[in-house]
Amino acid sequence: MNIMFATIHHLAKVAEVWTPKEKTLFHVATTSDRLHSPPPSPFKPLIDPLRQWLDNIEVNNRTLARFLCKLIPTQCPFERDVRVFGRTLFHIPPMCKLNPLYDELIGLRFRALCYLADVCGEDVSQYC
């Protein structure tokens, strides 16, 4: 059930303004949301420990922070415009969000940048 339907349901319950048609529409909408939810990933038990490990890495070393900033790219390296004779044939969209560890890697890079800037006082513009 999404927020909008939950809010409408709560407001209608408080105001007691349900019509039979609204009850039917609300029931169909909330039931269809539950029926079309994606199935759980079979890789979740394998990926969750990696996510936790990446989230628990503490950046407290200047060398490690520099290494992470150089290793993890600032933007998706796969996004490309394929051009021939100056004309764009097609565009390859960024596929980083398909990586199940993308958010954790970006968070790790951000922690490394913050460590270099805040603790070490380095200029981090070379890593951006």
Image (cartoon, rainbow, N blue to C red):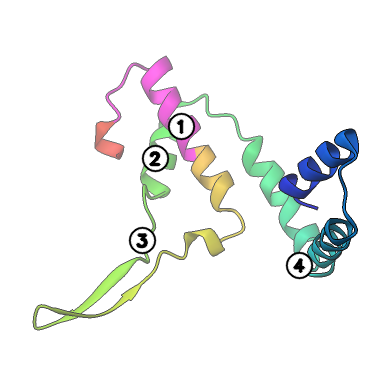
- Disc 3 crowd rating (10 Å Cα; few below 14, some 14-19, many 20+) is few
Under circle 4, the secondary element is loop
Judge depth for marks 2 and 4 and give the one in front.
Answer: 4
Q: Is residue 6 above or below residue 62?
A: below
The magenta stretch spans residue 113: yes
Label 1 is placed on what type of residue?
A: Ala
What separation in Å lies between label 1 and label 3 (alpha carbons)?
20 Å
4 and 3 marks in contact (CB < 8 Å): no
Q: Which residue is mark 3?
A: 77
Q: Which residue is mark 4?
A: 38
What separation in Å lies between label 2 and label 1 (alpha carbons)?
7 Å
1 and 3 marks in contact (CB < 8 Å): no
Q: Is tag 2's residue or tag 4's residue first in the polypeptide sequence?
A: 4
Q: Is residue 1 left or right of residue 53?
A: right
2 and 1 marks in contact (CB < 8 Å): yes
- Residue at 45% in and 23% down: 115
What separation in Å lies between label 4 and label 1 (alpha carbons)?
34 Å
Residue 43: % across, % down? 75, 65
Instruction: Report the span colored magenta.
Output: 109-124
Q: Which residue is mark 2?
A: 69
- Residue at 30% in and 69% down: 80
Looking at the rendered structure, which numbered label has been put on residue 112? 1
